[in-house]
Image (tube, helix red, strand yellow):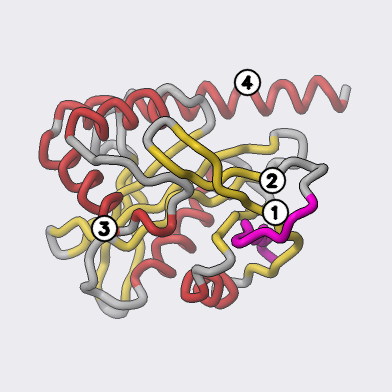
Amino acid sequence: MENALKDDYKSLTLAKIKKLKHGGFGRTSIKCMYADLGFEIILLTSDCAKSQELMELLGRWRKENEAWYLSQFPVSIRRTTRWFVDKLIEVPDRMLFIIKISGKYVGHVGLFGFDFDKRTCEIDNILRGEKDFPGIMGCAVRGMMDWGGRNLKLRGYSLKVLSDNLRAVRFYQKLGYQETSRIPLIQVNGRDGLEWAQAPQDYEGKAARYYVVMESV
């Protein structure tokens, strides 16, 4: 019976996510508050791939923050659109919400990597694209987590952050996340040059960077 309930939860959750991601931009919006201002985080949907404005924006933000990604590569609208379709829309358990306040997009927050047995998920792609409205990212992450609990019946969250991104580590600590483990990373040859990857289990060298695994408490 327990396994059947877990299977039901997984299939129903994935079906709901798919429906939402193909439901049209603007139909799934989470209302949040920042100081005395209301703002929203809007689910990016399949039709957003046709928006040059959004693809340019996502690409620019990615390029400006590439130091905190595992790989760096030339950014273009075509490549961003391909990533958007293949690595976001077509990935069953991945969602990305763009933050909009006072008519302006300022960043994005996401969910990815569901553990359907535990009903947990990683928060993913937390990126501040514009410098306006300091403190809004925390409000957006909390709003997304609350939404996930209400609408996807999630019971907890985790994340991974690069160990040298100290500002991000402190940000997550303020949101109630605590470090639970570290994953050593090494540089490898990727398609577009050097990139960071998880070190093999028999790796005996000293890792230059780590993925810090954190969980909400």
**Please, is residue 210 above or below residue 200 in the view?**
below
Query: Of helix, strand and loop, which one carries label 4?
Result: helix
Residue 17, given in percent of the width and then of the height, sits at: 47, 29
Which residue, given by chain and number where applicable, does mark 4 sit on?
11
| Residue 25 counted in the magenta span | no
Which residue, given by chain and number where applicable, does mark 2 sit on?
199
| Residues at marks 1 and 2 touching, judged by CB atoms closer than 8 Å | yes
State which tag comes first along the sequence, 1 or 2.
1
Query: Of helix, strand and loop, which one carries label 3?
Result: helix
Q: Dividing the picture into quarters, in which one does residue 31 lie? A: bottom left
Label 2 or label 4, whichever lies nearer to me, is 2
Label 4 or label 3, whichever lies nearer to me, is 3
Quote the CA–CA distance across marks 4 and 3. Answer: 37 Å
Quote the CA–CA distance across marks 1 and 4. Answer: 30 Å
Residue 36, given in percent of the width and then of the height, sits at: 27, 78
Label 1 or label 4, whichever lies nearer to me, is 1
Nearest to the observer: residue 205 or residue 55: 205
> Which mark is drawn over residue 64?
3
The amino acid type found where label 4 is placed reads Ser
- The quadrant of the picture occupied by the C terminus is bottom right
Kindly tell me whether residue 40 is visible in this rendering: no
State which tag comes first along the sequence, 2 or 4.
4
